[in-house]
Image (spheres, rainbow, N blue to C red):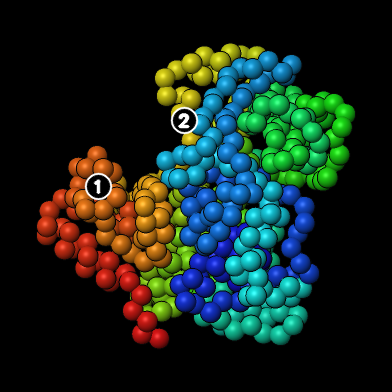
Amino acid sequence: MVGAGPVGLVVAGLLGRGGVDVQVVERHAGPYGLPRAVHVDGEVARVLQAVGVGERFRAISRGMPGLRLVGPGGSVLAEFTRDSAVGAGGYPESSMFHQPDLERLLLDEVGDRVRWGVTVTGVEQWGVRTDAGDVRARYVVACDGADSFVRRELGIGSRTLGRPQSWVVVDVEGDDLVRWGGVHQVCDRRRAATYMRVVGRRYRWEYRVDGGRPAPPWTGGAEVVREAAYTFRARVARRWRVGSVFLAGDAAHEGPPFVGQGLGSGLRDAHNLAWKLVHALRGGDPGILDTYESERGAQAVRTIRSAQVVGWALGAGPARRAVIRGAARLPGVAGAALRYSSPALAPGPLVGRTPLAGRLCPQWSTPDGWTDDLLGPHPAVVDLDSPYAGWLRSAGVHAALIRPDLIVLDTAKSAADITRLHARAEQLSVVDNR
């Protein structure tokens, strides 16, 4: 692993839980202590659960109750509220958190596998060269950020999906600076901005630079913790794999922040790739790794496009703000604005063409524990005798094969189909012929 940010730590944690030896090299001397990511959705919280920090994440985060679109003078154009306690997957649909707190949880799981202060100087098919010596590995996963050394070293270019924008992010601490707990998006052609309470006494304010600095949404009593200029880009690496080397997180894709999916997209990469690496490293067919880019690349592009639509709303003048007010009253708009769901995977080697295939399975709390934990990190067939019965019946199927990343691979309507699912699950299970 190259990079000990949240994406790299999650990949390392998932690999370790799969019985794979893993080492992480990080050029910085220790964890970064200032806030960066502040949001994950309910689906991504389940990735944190898979790596063993789900309950501890609940304790350091808060459910975010919704979204307000506001005009230049602070008038509310539209407000979308949700139940911030729990969503369909067992977590709030949106959770706010302080990234250093999350990284501490992840380091509790995998910190002994991290080598701090080690800089990668070269990339080979057998591993990486570093300023502390060679590190040999069957596979390398580069989670080394938007300015990825590994991506540049491999000569991988990017496909640009939109024009970059210059923004400033300001993190502050104070008391009751913003009363409502949701996210505020300021729709202003000249001074687009976003502000929100994060957790505790922490707040964030972001504004587009080319429109000039707008007045902050609070007065007095605020201590600036961090102020940083960013260029938000919309681009995707042209290749996510070169032989035994893979890109993940910002090394593979960058998008505007307007749907809060920067970290979420990287953790989806981690979940998708890790179980396939475990399968290949423990004796399975390494050809399974060919599906990583084909599955996640299309999802990443769709996520970036969604963020660009929200960015369009932020740049609203009077006419566009009128459209936003009208659209907000339409049935179904509130639900669409509040819940981000990862796009379904297209049919392929690991996704069938039956109902539910390619979509994330749901999760419930049962007397025996959360259903994700009961499934474990293995392919599993669930049927009408399981807690999934109601979900299966609603789709008109009798059973489903769920991948280790909680995506439905295929479903069954007959006894013969169920037998086929079990055979496929056996094929994908770790065989450990190392």
Q: Nearer the viewer, residue 40 or 249?
A: 40
Disc 2 to disc 1, how far (Cα)? 27 Å
Q: Residue at x 76, y 30 (%)?
A: 176
- Above or below, comparing residue 153 to residue 201 in the picture: below
Q: Residue at x 61, y 49 (%)?
A: 59
Q: Mark 1 is on which residue type?
A: Ala
Task: Say which of marks 2 and 1 sits in front.
Answer: 1
What crowding class fits label 1: few (fewer than 14 Cα within 10 Å), some (14-19), or many (20 or more)? some
Q: Residue 81: percent from the left, percent from the top? A: 54, 26
Tag 1 residue: 389
Q: Residue 35: percent from the left, percent from the top? A: 74, 49
> In this rendering, does residue 143 appear at all?
no
Q: Residue at x 57, y 48 (%)?
A: 58
- Above or below, comparing residue 179 to residue 426 in the picture: above
| Res 410 quadrant in image | bottom left
Tag 2 residue: 336
Q: How many marks?
A: 2
Q: Residue 380: percent from the left, percent from the top? A: 30, 62
Q: Which mark is residue 148?
A: none
Residue pushed farthest front?
A: 367
